[in-house]
Image (tube, grey):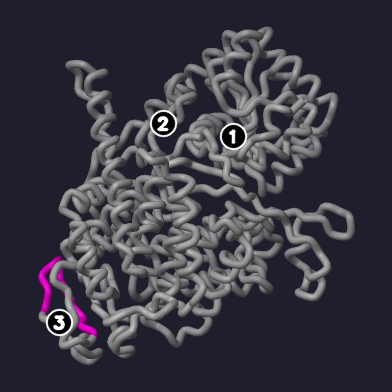
């Protein structure tokens, strides 16, 4: 029955190809079939390493009687939320009108034109604890469609209208200063679990973007980030054998985790460890945690061709039985006899950008020698496979087959940001040039979209402020055609939003001297989010991290070294190099004279005229592009700091 899914790029879809349910992939064909048959649509959204998605697949989608009812009365669509994040965001927003328990599997019932009229998450095969069975749900929905269709159409229209109204952009406000950012830290500290670490009650997630914000805040913020990271690292949330972190825990003490491991969580937590270790080389605990994460990324999630897999499953076969966590809870000796949980080998552009950037930064901060090579391999793979000749970004691929899914804004921003971090670490200006082109395309797409929206509004003022960044090519075409595309979600529970990722890359381009338009765009994007971020800091960690960078003095540090060794490490005065890496700075670059010249020739003015001093390493400390005379030793560099 699931033949349409057999050749999908998504492992999640391919896993359902053997179901008796007559699944369609996301696309126009499914909605055309629903219109032809005049039946509602079931949209089932999940991902390959989702535990409860596995459970519902076994209990309901593999059941012949359930499949018969679905096939007779619905058109069923299976969606990988990681392949189609815009589709997931749109239907999550719609589902919030029907349930507070949002998550995956997400189960949405919609009209033939895609407007949701009922939604939930996991439904069991039999009624339990007040929850109806899935067969009861589909029977009730089918009956309502046949007998009370008008009411369902009204509900669908009301939900769609409410979402369109709620998605209107708020008026931009001022960027927060130090006092407002300190208040955000205090609000997070008040929600800290002082016994077990982390925030709030169970279930508990790492919330890595929030830790990234806290790590940027000296004093209580940095201390809170460190406490939280080490508490999680000492808990069952972290695999004590290979160093990776699991997705979340169902209890306050981080026990009983769900054992899937995501590329996003581990890349961002690596970044937190690298930031906490910067300038604090004697923090052996943080360094050990960071190196463990880097090892997990390189040894487990990196695929032979260079890209990083999206995740590792929670389930595996142990003694012939499929179990969740059986491998993860085994000791090293036992693991040698077991097959590890499978990887979701889907390579996502944005998520790989996160890993590239984190590994590039960890290379120096954590003295992780394999990290830079891994970052370079991943970047080369993504640029070769996911960047079209015309500069268009592709969302996903697997085994060399590129998905037809439209790229999301996070793909543009995260890839650009990761490439900039790689360029800073390696001195490879070509990475910075590509990153600049990606952000330029996003800025141009936003201008084009604003012009279209203004023309459509006619004489009336546009209802929303134009976006600062937009994905070239526009939103998912299936959503857009049906009026269901929403603006990019700015919230950042598990990873930076596409808006913040683009703004962060733009800020770094400005720091390199690419031009004021990048700083202006970054600040304008964050002004749009400032009010919501200060009100709910737990949901806007990456945006608050960038706002913290805005509020700090702008210090650019360029160290010109004679050469690099075979691993890419700068060769020069070791003391000067160490002092530069430990110094407080908005951006620190270690480059050769030739690399500095290449950056300057490419239009990155910070690097213009940066040369050695009498053939020896030289450090240039700049305050917003106004630079002191170069110095040649660590003591002199330290003396330049205020």
Q: What residue sits right under mark 1 in the picture?
A: 99
Q: Residues within 10 Å of mark 3 (few under 14, many from 20)?
A: many
Q: Nearer the viewer, residue 567 or 511?
A: 567
> In screen coordinates, is 198 left or right of 632?
right
Callout in the foreground (1, 3):
3
Mark number displayed over residue 475: 2
Tell whether label 3 touches label 2 (CB within 8 Å). no
Q: What residue sits right under mark 3 in the picture?
A: 630
Q: Quadrant of the N terminus?
A: top right
Q: Quadrant of the C terminus?
A: bottom left
Q: Nearer the viewer, residue 191 or 478?
A: 478
Give above or below for 635 relative to 131.
Answer: below
Q: Residues within 10 Å of mark 1 (few under 14, many from 20)?
A: few
State the residue at coordinates (54%, 79%): 288
State the residue at coordinates (55%, 20%): 28
Say which label, 1 or 2, has the lower sequence index.
1
State the residue at coordinates (52%, 56%): 264
Query: Magenta stretch?
Result: 617-628
Q: Where does the image place residue 162, in percent across and percent down from the top left?
A: 43, 25
> In screen coordinates, is 26 left or right of 634?
right
Say which label, 2 or 3, has the lower sequence index.
2
Can I make out residue 638 in this image?
A: no
Q: Where does the image place residue 475, in percent across and percent down from the top left?
A: 41, 31
Residue 232 lies in magenta, yes or no? Answer: no
Tell whether label 3 touches label 1 (CB within 8 Å). no
Callout in the foreground (2, 3):
3
Q: Residues within 10 Å of mark 2 (few under 14, many from 20)?
A: many
Give above or below for 55 relative to 429.
Answer: above
Which element is circle 3 on?
Answer: loop
């Amino acid at each position: 029955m699931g033949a349409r899914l057999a050749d999908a790029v998504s492992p999640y879809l391919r896993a359902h190809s053997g179901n008796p349910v007559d699944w369609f992939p996301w696309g126009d064909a499914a909605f055309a079939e629903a219109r032809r048959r005049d039946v509602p649509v079931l949209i089932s959204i999940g991902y390959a390493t989702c535990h409860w998605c596995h459970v519902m697949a076994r209990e309901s989608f593999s059941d012949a009687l359930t499949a018969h009812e679905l096939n007779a009365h619905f058109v069923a669509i299976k969606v990988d939320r990681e392949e189609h994040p815009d589709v997931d965001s749109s239907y999550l927003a719609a589902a919030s009108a029907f349930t507070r328990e949002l998550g995956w599997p997400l189960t949405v019932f919609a009209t033939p034109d895609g407007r949701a009229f009922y939604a939930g998450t996991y439904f069991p095969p039999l009624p339990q604890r007040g929850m109806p069975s899935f067969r009861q749900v589909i029977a009730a929905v089918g009956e309502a469609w046949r007998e009370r269709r008008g009411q369902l159409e009204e509900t669908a229209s009301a939900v769609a209208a409410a979402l369109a109204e709620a998605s209107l952009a708020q008026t931009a406000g001022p960027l927060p200063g130090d006092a407002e950012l300190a208040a955000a830290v205090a609000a997070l500290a008040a929600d800290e679990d002082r016994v077990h670490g982390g925030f709030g009650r169970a279930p508990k997630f790492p919330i890595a973007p929030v830790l990234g914000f806290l790590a940027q805040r000296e004093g209580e913020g940095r201390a809170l980030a460190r406490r939280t990271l080490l508490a999680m690292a000492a808990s069952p949330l972290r695999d004590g054998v290979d160093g990776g972190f699991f997705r979340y825990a169902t209890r306050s003490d981080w026990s009983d985790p769900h054992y899937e491991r995501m590329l996003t969580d581990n890349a961002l937590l690596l970044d937190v460890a690298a930031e906490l270790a910067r300038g604090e080389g004697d923090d052996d605990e943080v360094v050990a945690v960071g190196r463990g994460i880097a090892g997990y990324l390189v040894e487990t999630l990196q695929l032979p061709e260079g890209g990083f897999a999206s995740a590792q499953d929670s389930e595996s076969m142990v003694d012939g039985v499929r179990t969740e966590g059986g491998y993860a809870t085994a000791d090293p000796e036992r693991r040698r006899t077991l097959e590890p949980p499978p990887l979701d080998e889907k390579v996502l552009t944005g998520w790989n950008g996160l890993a590239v950037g984190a590994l590039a930064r960890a290379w120096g901060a954590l003295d992780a020698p394999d990290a830079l090579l891994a970052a370079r391999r991943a970047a080369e793979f993504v640029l070769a496979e996911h960047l079209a000749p015309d500069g268009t970004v592709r969302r996903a691929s697997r085994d060399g087959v590129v998905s037809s899914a439209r790229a999301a804004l996070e793909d543009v921003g995260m890839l650009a940001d990761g490439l900039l971090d790689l360029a800073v670490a390696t001195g490879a200006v070509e990475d910075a040039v590509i990153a600049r082109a990606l952000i330029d395309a996003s800025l141009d797409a936003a201008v084009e979209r604003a012009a279209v929206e203004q023309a459509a509004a006619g004489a009336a003022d546009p209802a929303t402020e134009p976006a600062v960044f937009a994905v070239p090519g526009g939103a998912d075409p299936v959503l857009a055609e049906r009026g269901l595309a929403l603006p990019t979600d700015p919230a950042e529970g598990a990873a930076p939003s596409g808006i913040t990722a683009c703004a962060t890359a733009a800020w770094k381009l400005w720091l390199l001297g690419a031009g004021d338009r990048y700083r202006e765009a970054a600040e304008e994007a964050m002004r749009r989010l400032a009010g919501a971020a200060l009100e709910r800091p737990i949901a806007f960690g990456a945006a608050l991290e960038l706002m913290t960078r805005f509020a700090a003095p702008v210090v650019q540090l360029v160290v010109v070294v004679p050469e690099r060794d075979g691993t890419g490490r700068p060769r020069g005065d070791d003391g000067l190099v160490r002092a530069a890496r430990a110094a407080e700075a908005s951006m620190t670059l270690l480059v050769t004279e030739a690399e500095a010249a290449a950056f300057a020739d490419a239009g990155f003015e910070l690097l213009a005229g940066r040369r050695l001093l009498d053939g020896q390493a030289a450090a240039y400390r700049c305050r917003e592009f106004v630079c002191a005379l170069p110095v040649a030793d660590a003591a002199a560099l330290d003396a330049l700091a205020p």
